[in-house]
């Protein structure tokens, strides 16, 4: 794409630059506070333009692929503030195990320091969306990496901004004066419900809005957010939800899709349970959580709820209260008024 063809799409406080992020000409040095992105995986996925014509080539040679990422990551390093944080999401594919390590190594070679790795769990207890890839040769991948990268020691994060209540309340006063704990480095974030390219909104590999939403919140005083591989605009949708300015680069944008995702999505922030916490709860609680997180239909949820015993309903209500999941999870459940009032009194 020629520089003369660069243009900007504006959706309230979110901007999409229609150009490759190999040259982020619109951004000044150290002007960005947070970067959240997931680069192309180089596995032949389809990235098409609004009119359906072919876009980015996702089957480069490994040498060309890594060189392309290095060019973008060097630009990311240039525009990220010295106190900023870069969240790089990438997983390994069935035919290319270890690719994620090659990618993060390129990021390090581009000037970043590797802080830690967050595990994004996409499926739990057999529930949640992932692409089956194991067959008879290997196990399916149920998780991906979110590499946390920084430019210098001049950074801070706020873990309790996305914290969770203590399961063992005796820890209050021992580790913290408030009922809030660091959520840790395993994030269970299910995909939004997907039934093919129609629901995926014309993009083969969008990550859920909940991922950048959690990542951005970790960075205190963040004002400007960047996604150099904007795709359908998940990162910008999260920035919009948080009232921050977002900037994305996308050489082959699907404009209506991006606008819908940023401005009209139905994303509701939810503190999903930590993996260790789930071990403390009953099968009924786990079953109900699975259905709620899997976007089971309202009719099915109501039928399941109405089939529970009163004791089981109370147990579930206590559990999600303890997990800090109210009120969003309760909105889908036809809770009897007297049961809900009794729970509040208890």
Image (cartoon, rainbow, N blue to C red):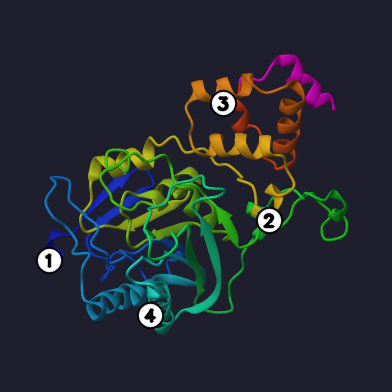
Kindly identify which numbered label has been placed on residue 332.
Answer: 3
Can residue 220 be seen from the camera position used here?
no
Kindly identify which numbered label has been placed on residue 2.
Answer: 1
Mark 3 Cα within 10 Å, few/some/many (few <14, many 20+)?
A: some
Specify which label sits upstream in the sequence, 4 or 3.
4
Q: What residue did someone put label 4 on? A: 106
Stretch in magenta: 334-346
Q: Is residue 287 above or below residue 179?
A: above
Q: What SS does tag 3 mark?
A: helix
Residue for point 15% across, 66% down: 3
Q: What SS does tag 4 mark?
A: helix
Mark 2 Cα within 10 Å, few/some/many (few <14, many 20+)?
A: some
Question: Nearer the observer, disc 1 or disc 3?
Answer: 3
Question: Nearer the observer, disc 2 or disc 3?
Answer: 3
Residue 325's quadrant in the figure? top right
Q: What SS does tag 1 mark?
A: loop
Specify which label sits upstream in the sequence, 4 or 2.
4
State the separation of the CA atoms marked 4 and 3: 44 Å
Residue for point 22% across, 78% down: 64
Mark 4 Cα within 10 Å, few/some/many (few <14, many 20+)?
A: some
State the separation of the CA atoms marked 2 and 1: 45 Å
In the displayed structure image, the side of residue 311 where residue 184 appears, left or right? left
Mark 2 near mark 1, Cβ–Cβ under 8 Å?
Answer: no
State the separation of the CA atoms marked 4 and 2: 30 Å
């Amino acid at each position: 794409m020629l520089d003369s063809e660069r243009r900007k799409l504006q959706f309230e406080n979110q901007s999409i630059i229609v150009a490759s992020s190999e040259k982020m000409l619109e951004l000044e040095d150290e002007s960005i506070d947070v970067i959240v992105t997931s680069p192309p995986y180089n596995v032949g996925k389809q990235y098409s333009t609004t009119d359906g014509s072919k876009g980015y080539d996702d089957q480069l040679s490994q040498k060309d692929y890594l060189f392309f990422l290095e060019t973008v990551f060097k630009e990311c390093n240039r525009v990220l503030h010295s106190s900023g944080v870069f969240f790089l999401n990438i997983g390994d594919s069935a035919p290319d195990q270890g690719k994620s390590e090659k990618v993060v190594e390129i990021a390090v070679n581009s000037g970043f320091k590797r802080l830690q790795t967050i595990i994004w769990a996409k499926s739990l207890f057999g529930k949640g969306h992932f692409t089956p890839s194991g067959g008879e040769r290997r196990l399916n991948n149920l998780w991906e990496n979110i590499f946390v990268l920084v430019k210098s020691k001049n950074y801070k994060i706020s873990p309790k901004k996305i914290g969770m209540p203590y399961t063992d309340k005796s820890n209050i006063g021992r580790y913290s004066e408030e009922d809030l704990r660091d959520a840790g480095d395993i994030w269970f974030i299910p995909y939004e419900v997907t039934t093919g390219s129609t629901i995926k909104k014309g993009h083969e590999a969008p990550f859920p809005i909940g991922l950048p939403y959690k990542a951005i919140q970790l960075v205190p005083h963040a004002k400007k957010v960047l996604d150099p591989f904007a795709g359908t605009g998940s990162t910008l949708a999260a920035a919009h939800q948080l009232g921050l300015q977002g900037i994305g680069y996308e050489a082959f944008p699907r404009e209506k899709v991006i606008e819908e995702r940023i401005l009209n999505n139905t994303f509701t922030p939810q503190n999903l349970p930590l993996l260790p916490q789930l071990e403390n709860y009953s099968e009924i609680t786990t079953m109900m959580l699975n259905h709620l997180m899997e976007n089971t239909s309202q009719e099915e949820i109501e039928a399941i709820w109405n089939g529970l015993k009163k004791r089981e309903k109370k147990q579930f209500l206590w559990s999600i209260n303890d997990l800090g999941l109210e009120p969003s999870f309760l909105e889908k459940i036809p809770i009897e008024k007297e049961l809900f009032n009794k729970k509040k009194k208890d």
